[in-house]
Amino acid sequence: MTQRVYLIGFMGSGKSTLGRWLADTMEGWTFLDLDHFIENKFHKTIAQIFDEKGEQGFRQIEAMCLNEVSSFEKVIIGAGGGTPCFFDNMEVMNNSGLTIYLQLRPEVIYQRLQTSKTQRPLISGMQGIELLNFIKHKLSQREPYYLKAKLIADAENWKIVDFVKAIAKHS
Ligand SMILES: Nc1ncnc2c1ncn2[C@@H]1O[C@H](COP(=O)(O)OP(=O)(O)OP(=O)(O)O)[C@@H](O)[C@H]1O
Ligand SMILES: O=C(O)C1=C[C@@H](O)[C@@H](O)[C@H](O)C1
Ligand SMILES: [Mg+2]
């Protein structure tokens, strides 16, 4: 059985929610949110890192931290929304575990982002049609990277048992 599961997908696609449920269900496994790992390591919020180092600086830190966690064991890793789209991050994840893309329509991502309180620097201050258009545009740029995942999950209609079975099957 694989030692690592990477949940990837757009901001608000449910990576943290599903990741926590999976870790609660799978004995001995823990959930690691890559954004939180970065925040704890640097004692700064993601928003502060963006402010101080720009997106480029953040992406370097993100790739370094991804490499670090890619040797952890029995861990469900919730990637950042942009993680798969920079450097060789997708290869790092595919070579060290099971990658699962949580696929959703832009309209559903938009709805979920409305209900979520997490701070997201890339969309801060955006709302309504501006936010929906941003999601559509960014998702179309990012999907080719997300689709390199080993498993594509219909994240609008999933059942936790399907994920647990898929993970158990993957060696
Ligand atoms: N299966 C689901 N059905 C309905 N709502 C959901 C589902 N999963 C998550 N949500 C809601 O969608 C919002 C975003 O979920 P979550 O924070 O888990 O996404 P995320 O992919 O971790 O986002 P980010 O990339 O910004 O960290 C939350 O308000 C959450 O409660
Ligand atoms: O989609 C993105 O590019 C991001 C998503 C978040 O998880 C954070 O990693 C950061 O806010 C950037
Ligand atoms: Mg999250």
Image: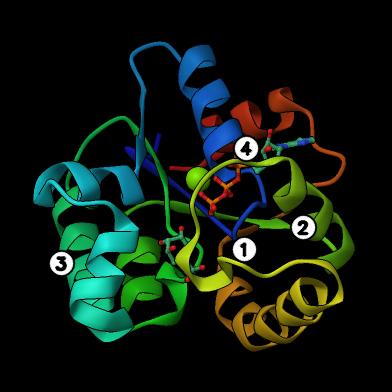
Q: Which amino acid does label 3 sit on?
A: Met
Real-space Cα distance between discs 1 and 2?
8 Å
Residue 166 - label: 4
Give the percent coordinates (x, y) of residue 135: 73, 74
In what quadrant does ligand 2 lie?
bottom left
Which marked residue is nearer to the observer: mark 2 or mark 4?
Answer: 2
Q: Does the residue labelled 2 lie within 8 Å of ligand 1?
A: no
In the image as oriented, which residue stretches furthest toward the front?
125
Real-space Cα distance between discs 2 and 3?
28 Å
Circle nearer the N terminus (3, 1): 1
- Direction from residue 118 to residue 134 in the image, left or right: right
Give the percent coordinates (x, y) of residue 90: 40, 72
- Direction from residue 17 to residue 122 in the image, left or right: left
Residue shown at the point (26%, 62%) measured from the top left: 48
Give the percent coordinates (x, y) of residue 150: 57, 61
Real-space Cα distance between discs 2 and 4?
24 Å
Closer-to-camera residue (37/101): 37
Circle nearer the N terminus (2, 3): 3
Q: What residue type is labelled 1?
A: Phe
In the rendered image, which residue does mark 2 sit on? 109
In the rendered image, which residue does mark 3 sit on? 64
Within-10-Å neighbours for mark 2: few <14, some 14–19, many 20+: many
In the rendered image, which residue does mark 1 sit on? 10
Circle nearer the N terminus (1, 2): 1
Real-space Cα distance between discs 1 and 4?
21 Å
